[in-house]
Amino acid sequence: MASTHTASVLVASNRGPVSYALDEDRRLTARRGGGGLVSGLSAIGPDTDAVWVCSALGDGDREAVRRTGGALDPADTGGRRVRMLDIDAQVHSDAYNGIANSVLWFIHHMLYQTPLEPVFDAGFRRQWAAYESYNRAFAEALAEEAGQGAAVLIQDYHLALAPRMLRELRPDLRIGHFSHTPWAPPDYFRLLPDDIAAQLLGGILGADRAAFLTRRWADAFTDCCHAVLGPGIPSGTRVGVHGLGADAEFLRERAHRPDVDERMATLRRQIGTAPDGGPRRTIVRVDRTELSKNIVRGLLAYEELLQSYPQWRERVVHIAFAYPSRQDLAVYRAYTAEVQRVATEINSRYGTPGWTPVELHVKDDFARSLAAYRLADVALVNPIRDGMNLVAKEVPVVSDEGCALVLSREAGAHEELGEEALTVNPYDIGGTAAALHTALSMPSGERTERTKRLTAQATALPPARWFLDQLAALEG
Ligand code: G6P
């Protein structure tokens, strides 16, 4: 693809704003990507010269790149310029599945525990070389697209080396790096081989600004720099914090469309009525099926609720949506199976002819997620660690009757919502069961008041503002 050298604003991320499915007749269908980054970029609008550089992730994406040369059809991207890179499939897999999701994700979420241990052998070094080439491909594409002095916002742990590589290619650019994950504390970060730890930090320090979702993650990054590279943040990189909130306008409009109403009717039938004829209460969780989300302990806490507070039997349903994620990785597949096994076990142990205690659904359906948000009496968000967690912010905004929020103290969202939520230690199953009981028992007046305050906090930093603030800080 010919270089343009024209864009004044660029975004780079592994997952782009659109992905393609290829059907049997080799027709391509574009699907808009979800998440805060997509909403955030919408702030720029279609009539600008901004370019979003992302990677092809599957066969559909690769075919789209082949047909377009990488500059995606604006009809598929809401009129925005998107350049999709067709990185060699093996290189991408080693970088994305091998390094980014098996090593860096596990380090920042502190997921390694015996017997799941990191392996830094020759295979790891081969994958690391792929991670370097993958980052270089992004740096080169960005260098080609960027106009003189452009602002470049590089996203997440997939692209920790790209800032320094880009700086070397184009010293004129203003470069920001943003981490959507937590950042590990030094003792844990230093599980990584020393040279790799230094390269990751040095890569991000190639940016003018390194930004994080909360102060806690920003401080951990600074602490890691001191521990690995010596005192002081070298190269004048500024460290910043930009929280990301729920997009209230979008969510409220989307949650009241007919497809959501239809799914609410189905869910209501599944929930059923309590023995006294009133509606059953609902505990709702919506996650990718992801180890850091702690879904199994959430189910065990619900089981303990039914065991220790038997008054809730037949009167509550746990709606758990656990959408498949990163299924190329065996550890994710095993976790998905474990989630299903535990849910089935709870249903066979406690279920009765008219009551299914856990409604577990694994097929991704955004409209059904919103329907569950609207019906939620309690939202359960109990990750082991989480950069922010937008579900914690979205449920209070969307719920029809207001909801009580049971929230892990290890989620970034806890820094903002902690006062109004019922805080749990994510490892404490008994404590989480007790918090669920308190949440279900909360008087409706208190629940309404808390939901109002949660909503105000949750919507204080809409995605557009998150994006524009970063741009302004980089330009300042
Ligand atoms: C987290 C990461 C994102 C990533 C998302 C989904 O939120 O911070 O960068 O896109 O998970 O994961 P996936 O591997 O499907 O892109």
Image: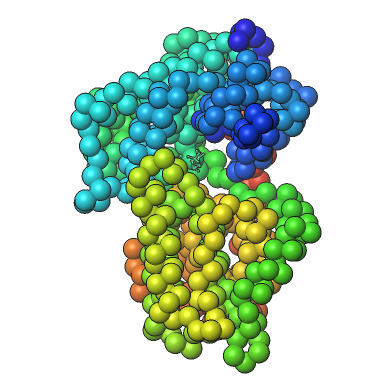
- Residue 314, percent across and down? 53, 84
- Residue 11, percent across and down? 59, 26
333 in relation to 242, above or below: below
Q: How is the image coloured?
A: rainbow
- Asked where in the image residue 204 lies, by quadrant, the reply is top left
Q: Nearer the viewer, residue 384 or 22?
A: 22
Q: Nearer the viewer, residue 456 or 444?
A: 444
**Quadrant showing the C terminus:** top right
214 in relation to 360, above or below: above
Does residue 355 appear in the picture of this structure? yes
Q: Nearer the viewer, residue 239 or 110?
A: 110
Q: Residue furthest bottom?
A: 276
- Residue placed at 51% from the left, 10% from the top? 170
Q: Residue furthest front?
A: 25
Q: Is residue 272 left or right of residue 242?
A: right
27 in relation to 280, above or below: above
Q: What is the tally of numbered marks visible in this picture?
A: 0
- Residue placed at 38% from the left, 42% from the top? 329
- Residue 58, percent across and down? 53, 31
- Residue placed at 44% from the left, 81% from the top? 350
- Asked where in the image residue 145 lies, by quadrant, the reply is top right
- Residue 255, percent across and down? 72, 57
- Residue placed at 54% from the left, 29% from the top? 59
**Quadrant showing the N terminus:** top right
Q: Is residue 373 left or right of residue 210?
A: right
Does residue 183 appear in the picture of this structure? no
